[in-house]
Image: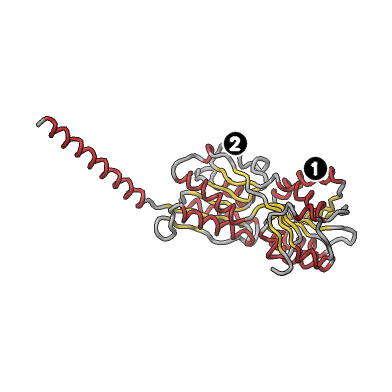
Amino acid sequence: MKRLLILISILGLLLAACGGDDKDKDNKAGEQYTIGIINLSINLESVITGFKTQMAELGYIEGENITYIYDGPPASITGLDELAQKLVEADVDLILCVSTPATQAVQRATAEKPIPSVFAVVQDPIGSGIVSSLTEPGGNATGITFGPAEGKRLEWLTRAVPGIKRVYIPYNDDDPAPHAALVLVSEAAEHLDVELVLQPAHGAEEIDAAIKNIPDDVDAIMILPDSIVSQRITDLAALAIERKLPFSVTVSDNVVAAGALISFGMETEPVGQQAARLADQVLKGTKPSDLPVEVADFFLTINLKTATALGIEIPDSVLRQADIIIRDEE
């Protein structure tokens, strides 16, 4: 009789435990999240695509247990503060920030009402004041950076096209990201004995002029991580081919779309997926300050279609190390 009572007690405990598990599952299934998204550049939409795709893989299904608030890129950097404030007022659970200026706008908006954020495509999160360190971000934000690639990208350009001595760089002077990149690129340029022909610009008209008025005495064009100038990649690629100038971009996927010659940098959709994995941890309760900032994977991409158009033969030593090669027949 005593043995029977013990068995009944054990069975009851097992049933209670199973019921508890079901209850936890029901609670988890019933949780609803709202994520705000703020993005400066139309060229970075694929970051958001990657983010949403990975979030769905992690069980966050749009229309079921997660809602996204996203109004698209603003007309200019000055519109970011209004978009960030709107997300704060919507009381979202987390904000995905795409670009350095977008992340800084969210920081300003969340100063009085802390909302966790995950950033992507940020050149220098420490120098931009977003985090205190990469290993211990502090504050209420963590994310993905790609800064270390910029100096190496100039080196790859000179290795792909030996003899380059003067490189033209138009950049948006209102964006902190290209300023941070210039530190690394300048150091590399000094080591490579390359002169940087810098053209800062403010606003759409000056940027347009900087793109159209490429100096006659430069050997190549390079753009920095710059949300505004990067929107003109197609125009720059066409001008570069017309002028027979090698053109280097910072985002690998733009090489295919725009016809630039070379890139050493991230691919935006995988960066979005990487950011989603951080967001998942934050939504599950981990503080952003406890999640180290991650570095994006870098890819060397060579566009042989463009090389042919420029009359350039890329050395085999470079082609053998390329991660992606766009060939004439593709």
What residue do we see at 63% from left, 46% from top?
A: 145
Q: Is residue 232 visible?
A: no
Q: Where on the picture, by quarter, is residue 262?
A: bottom right
* Residue closest to the far left: 1
**SS at mark 2 in the image:** loop
Q: In the drawing, does residue 249 fall left or right of residue 161?
A: left
Q: Which residue is mark 1?
A: 187
Assign the C terminus to one quadrant of the image. bottom right
Judge by depth and name the residue closer to the eye, 100 or 216. Answer: 216
Q: Which residue is mark 2?
A: 135
Lower sequence index among marks 2 and 1: 2
What residue do we see at 84% from left, 65% from top?
A: 311
**SS at mark 1 in the image:** helix
| Amino acid of disc 2 | Thr
| Amino acid of disc 1 | Glu
Q: Position of residue 23 (x, y in %)?
A: 29, 46
How many marks are shown on the rendered structure? 2
